[in-house]
Image (spheres, rainbow, N blue to C red):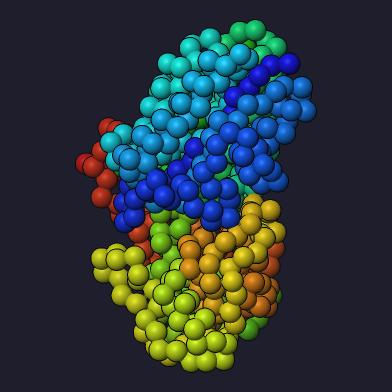
Amino acid sequence: MTVIAVGGWHHETNTFAPTPATYEAFTRDGGRPALCRGEAMLAALQGFNLPAAGFIDTALAQGHEVRPLLWCEATPSAAVTRDAYERISAMLIEDLEGLMASGRPPEALYLDLHGAMVAEHLDDGEGEFLSRVRRVVGDAMPLVASLDLHANVTAAMVEQVDALVAYRTYPHVDRRETGERAAGVMDSLLTGGRKPDKAFRQIPFLIPLTWQCTMVEPMASVYSALAEGEGGDVLTASVLAGFPLTDIPDCGPSVVAYGHDAVAVEGLADRLTVAILEREEAFDGKFYAPDEAVEYAMARSAEAKGPIIFADTQDNPGAGGNADTVGILDALVRHRAHGAVLGVMCDAEVAAAAHAAGEGAEITASLGAKSGQSGHTPLTGKYRVERLGDGRFTARGPMYRGFRMRLGPMALLNLDGVRIVVASAKQQAADKEMFRHLGVEPADVKILALKSSVHFRNDFTDVAHEILVVEAPGPSIADPAKLPFKRLRPGLRIKPKGKPLGE
């Protein structure tokens, strides 16, 4: 029986977002576990669609002993503060040093990481953390890490870890499965007796988040090629689409591969790189302006078999937005899109006012724009309170299944025939239960605007008549060519078929 230490630390950093990730952001329970240490971590992760949960269960089934360290995650936002980064890093290192000094120290280490974390004082949050970890455990200890599909992989990350194992789905329905695959890789390393050969490639263009979806082309074919290429001398490989809202030199897509034959590993990495490059033009699609989207949907809603869905991608809280912009809502109201529903808007002040007034009441409120973003103003009007909820429910969609949502007081409001789902805590609209909690059945809505980029597709595609990506004002810029990058590496194209920065 091998003793394996297990820990995790997640943050996806949008360096253009308005709100930093403080230490307190990692301690909040927003549906998934808040910061937890030691044995409490095992109970906290139980039943969640998270890599660490999948790794732990699989490693135990393989006969290994698991020793928990720390696990935490904060909602995507601007950079992690220096205070938060150094406090959490110190906790993880302290717990790891404690295990190393124990009577039965770990013989291997697994870390559940994101891969796109930037701190106020560090570009490469994971690379620096992994370097600190290696100084504690030494070069010989097997170290496997799982990564989010949106990781911006760096040379330091590849150097410090024996294998990186990334999600293969966006929406991320396979997070638990990724942990299970990482456990399989770890078991192979423990029984194989030698370090694997590695290959690492960085792709020379940024891919907009909205076109990274693995459910549709061109990513569907790329991941099919990945699945076909593994096996034999190739232990594992990953295609990482990158997080294009991060202004650091290593931003962008990448490929990693591992195995026990350098030629096979390098060959697969090259083939996957070519598969992405030859589809470059297909990674760019249409963005609708809010008025254009509303007019299009209203003209087709009568014959639509299911809702026409708007992806409010630039206010996606899963990419650094605060879920409080009103660009699409304003367009729906102005065009009298009666029956349309928008969610999930984050406005604790208005939710509290709705609860104070009660169901059936009418309140005058200024909704949205509470996060202080420049150029954004609330939508003021008389809102009817249709339904109230406590924000406590369990998600049931493929991606968030089992997540115990805690969104604070929630309200379903009606403004001139347009309904708005309002919560007190921000959460990407990626599960139907967020609407059902307030009595809205998404399949029955003609126009449904979701504050999400792609993750909503995991639970809403089955009812959607059509999906439009809408470019309403917000901090999670959909088109990388419109971002004020200053620090990307030379030669990196800021969008598919675009020009490198400075040209």
Q: Position of residue 11 (x, y in %)?
A: 45, 43
Q: Position of residue 88 (x, y in %)?
A: 42, 36
Q: Position of residue 18 (x, y in %)?
A: 31, 56
Q: Residue at x 67, y 42 (%)?
A: 43
Residue 310 seen: no
Q: Residue at x 66, y 78 (%)?
A: 439
Q: Residue at x 31, y 75 (%)?
A: 377
Q: Quadrant of the C terminus?
A: top left
Residue 385 seen: yes
Q: Position of residue 140 (x, y in %)?
A: 53, 9
Q: Quadrant of residue 292?
A: bottom left
Above or below, 251 relative to 290? above
In the depicted view, which residue is nearer to us: 392 or 236? 392
Q: Quadrant of the N terminus?
A: top right
In the depicted view, which residue is nearer to us: 89 or 366? 89
Q: Residue at x 61, y 13 (%)?
A: 103
